[in-house]
Every structure is written in structure tokens, then in C-alpha cells.
Image: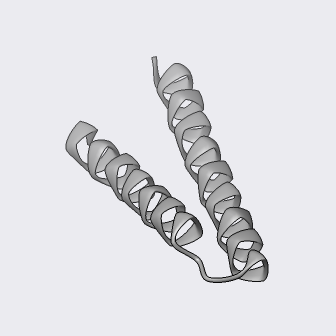
């Protein structure tokens, strides 16, 4: 199960990095804001994922 967790976390991080690159290379302020919002949403999804994983680990122990 640890490998799956690692894969999911790395996937979230890759998406966040991609949105960061898109934000930094955006042609307009509106695009930058949109990519920033998406980056924050993805970061929050990663946070929820890691929190739910750690809660599950604590309950299983």
C-alpha cells in the first residue's frame, strides 16, 4: 500500500508543479490567477489525501 500512497502523492506534486509552471509563463493576469487557484485546489486535495491516509493508518494501528 505504501507504493500506491507514494505514487498518488507524487502525482499530486507533479500536477502542482505543472500549474506553477503554467502560472509563471501565463500571458495575462487572468490566466495567472486561474492557474494559481487550480494550484491551490490541487494542494488542498493533496493535503486532504495525506490527512486521510494518516488517519487511516492511526485507526488501523
User: Looking at this rendering, what residue extends furthest in the top direction?
Assistant: 61
Where residue 38 appears, as percent x and y from the top left, is 66, 68
Residue displayed at 47% across by 27% down: 57
Q: Quadrant of residue 12?
A: bottom left
Q: Quadrant of residue 52?
A: top right
Residue displayed at 36% across by 58% down: 11
Where residue 18 appears, as percent x and y from the top left, is 43, 66
Where residue 28 appears, as percent x and y from the top left, is 70, 82
Residue displayed at 42% across by 51% down: 13
Q: Residue 53, relative to residue 60: is it above or below?
A: below
Q: Quadrant of the N terminus?
A: top left
Task: Decide which of 14, 49 is in the foreground and name it.
Answer: 14
Task: Decide which of 34, 47 is in the foreground and name it.
Answer: 34
Q: In the drawing, does residue 10 fall left or right of residue 54?
A: left
Task: Decide which of 20, 60 is in the foreground and name it.
Answer: 20
Q: In the drawing, does residue 5 fall left or right of residue 15?
A: left
Q: Residue 33, relative to residue 7: is it above or below?
A: below
Amino acid at each position: 500500500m505504501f507504493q500506491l500512497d507514494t505514487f498518488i502523492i507524487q502525482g499530486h506534486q507533479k500536477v502542482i508543479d505543472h500549474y506553477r509552471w503554467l502560472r509563471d509563463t501565463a500571458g495575462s493576469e487572468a490566466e495567472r490567477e486561474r492557474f494559481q487557484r487550480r494550484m491551490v485546489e490541487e494542494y488542498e486535495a493533496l493535503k486532504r489525501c495525506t490527512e486521510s491516509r494518516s488517519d487511516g493508518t492511526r485507526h488501523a494501528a
